[in-house]
Amino acid sequence: MSGSGRPSRHRVGAMRHRCTIQQETTTQDASGQPIVSWSNYVVNEPCEWNPTSGIENMRGRQLEAGTRAVFVVRYRSGYTTQMSVLFDGERYGITAINRVDGLRKYLEIICSAVL
């Protein structure tokens, strides 16, 4: 139970998964061309994983399929929508980051992955 007298929406026990938060790093090769790579920002982050839906989009004449998910992690400053989440071998792009209940206890990281 939280200090406000009502049960907390998230429990630490629900954070039984582990994910890695990565940030994009851009360098240049010898000819000045940009090389994009990903470096680890937080490794082995306890999280609660909630797949929310599968998506299919037509982009041009190609069908694009993917999944959407919400990861709940303990509050940590520094996360941005330019980062990505690696979970179970799949990379999820972060589309939004919200504080749970407006507090600095947990964050909901809303993501989508293109397959």
Image (spheres, rainbow, N blue to C red):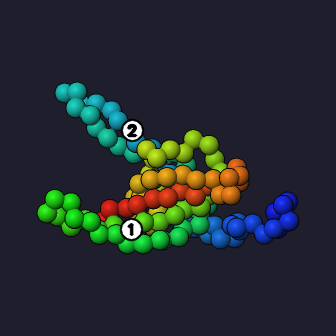
Quadrant in which the C terminus is drawn: bottom left
> Given the current orientation, which residue lies at the most extreme left position?
61
Mark 1 or mark 2, whichever is nearer to me: 1
Crowd tier of the residue under label 1, counting other residues whose Cα lies within 10 Å: few below 14, some 14–19, many 20 or above: some
Indicate the secondary structure of the residue bearing disc 1.
strand
Give the residue type at disc 1: Thr
> What percent of the width, then of the height, locates residue 97?
54, 52
Q: Which residue is mark 2?
A: 25
Give the residue type at disc 2: Thr
Q: Does the rendering let one see residue 102?
A: yes
Indicate the secondary structure of the residue bearing disc 2.
strand
Q: Quadrant of residue 25?
A: top left
> What percent of the width, then of the height, locates residue 12?
70, 66
Vertical arrangement, residue 1 with respect to residue 101, above or below: below
Q: Residue at x 69, y 67 (%)?
A: 10
Q: Is residue 47 left or right of residue 40?
A: right
Q: Is residue 58 left or right of residue 72?
A: left
Compare marks 1 and 2 and give the one earlier in the sequence.
2
> What percent of the width, then of the height, locates residue 54?
37, 72
Q: Which residue is mark 1?
A: 67
In this view, the residue in front, 78 or 6, is: 6
In this view, the residue in front, 73 or 37, is: 73
Q: Residue at x 33, y 32 (%)?
A: 27
Crowd tier of the residue under label 2, counting other residues whose Cα lies within 10 Å: few below 14, some 14–19, many 20 or above: few
In this view, the residue in front, 83 or 29, is: 83
